[in-house]
Amino acid sequence: MKPIRYSAAVPDHEVTVAGSRFFLDFAFPEVKLGIECQSVRWHLGDEALRRDSARMRKLSLAAWMILPYCWDEVVFDPAGVRREIEDALRLRSATLFS
């Protein structure tokens, strides 16, 4: 499979949706693909669950695809994470630019 070429992921990318401002850990804005690094520190507990759920719904309704990754996935399977991101980039490109 031929490697795809995209601009580098933009860190801390700001997205405003329905009057709410969000910062994605990394984004490919040209195809509305966001990468979120999940951790217990920021994503544990009832309030965090409600906040994250509302955030994901708003981003999804604004046509963003968000790929969440845990620390272990990034550290112990970086090739798998990269492969999934490349697959998502192909999918988003085909969907948005066809």
Image: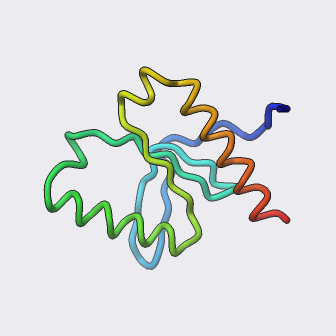
Q: Residue furthest bottom?
A: 18
Left or right: residue 13 versus residue 85 is left
What is the count of numbered marks? 0
**Residue occupying image coordinates x 52% and y 24%:** 78
Tell me what residue is drawn at x 23 percent, y 60 percent: 49
User: Which residue appears at 49% of the width and 24% of the height?
Assistant: 77
Vertical placement of residue 69 versus 45, above or below: above
Nearer to us in this view, 36 or 9: 36
Counting from the top left corner in percent of width and height, residue 42 is at: 23, 45
Q: Which quarter of the rendering shows the N terminus?
A: top right
Instruction: Name the residue nearer the viewer: 87 or 58.
Output: 87
Residue 90 place in picture, x, y as percent: 74, 48
Residue 21 x/y as whole percent: 40, 65
Left or right relative to 48: residue 69 = right
Left or right: residue 50 compared with residue 37: left
Residue 22 position in % (x across, y down) = 41, 60
Measured along the vertical axis of the image, is residue 83 above or below residue 54?
above
Q: Quadrant of the C terminus?
A: bottom right
Tell me which colouring the rendered structure shows. rainbow
Residue appearing at x 45%, y 79% in the figure: 18
